[in-house]
Image (tube, rainbow, N blue to C red):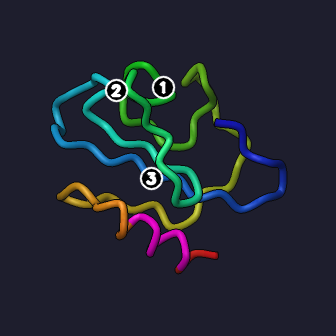
Amino acid sequence: VTAGINVWNHYVITGSDPNSSTASDFLFYHNGVSLTTSTGGPFGTVTGNRIGLDGGGDSAAGATLDDVRVYNRRLSAQEVVQLYRQGK
């Protein structure tokens, strides 16, 4: 996923199993649109639960994060779109 410079982006990752690191157990959204494919999404595996780090996970991504949320349930596609529209 490539985000534009100086452009607001909305990302959501939802999962069904909090102990899983397999990408196929997650749904990925960018600006309200699902990125998940039959191969399990754009990221391969999901580990570490690090928000705001670069692709290597070693340093800050150089972006500003706003309104980070963690829910105790999987959000529906409709809820993701609603959150995206609220943030615009």
Is residue 81 part of the magenta span, yes or no? yes
Total labels drawn? 3
| Region rendered in magenta | 80-85
Q: Which residue is mark 1?
A: 43
**Spot occupied by residue 44 in the image (x, y as percentages of width and height):** 43, 19
What residue is drawn where x is 46% and y is 68%?
Answer: 81
Which of the labelled discs sits on residue 12, or is there none?
3
Tell me the distance, in whole angstroms, between the alpha carbons under discs 1 and 2.
Answer: 7 Å
- Residue 35 in picture, x, y percent from top left: 50, 41
Q: Secondary structure at mark 1?
A: loop
Instruction: Find residue 40 and report its horizontal and vertical position in percent.
Output: 37, 26
Q: Earlier in the sequence, mark 1 or mark 2?
A: 2
Residue linked to disc 2: 23
Residue neighbourhood size for the residue with mark 3, other residues' Cα within 10 Å, grouped as few (<14), some (14–19), many (≥20): many
- What residue is at 58 percent from the left and 35 percent from the top? 53
The image shows residue 51 at horizontal and vertical percentages of: 48, 42
Dot 1 and dot 2 residues touching (CB under 8 Å): yes
Farthest residue toward the front? Answer: 38
Q: Is residue 69 magenta?
A: no
Whichever of labels 1 and 3 marks the residue nearer the N terminus, that label is: 3
Q: Residue at x 78, y 59 (%)?
A: 7
Q: Does 54 sit above or below residue 14?
A: above
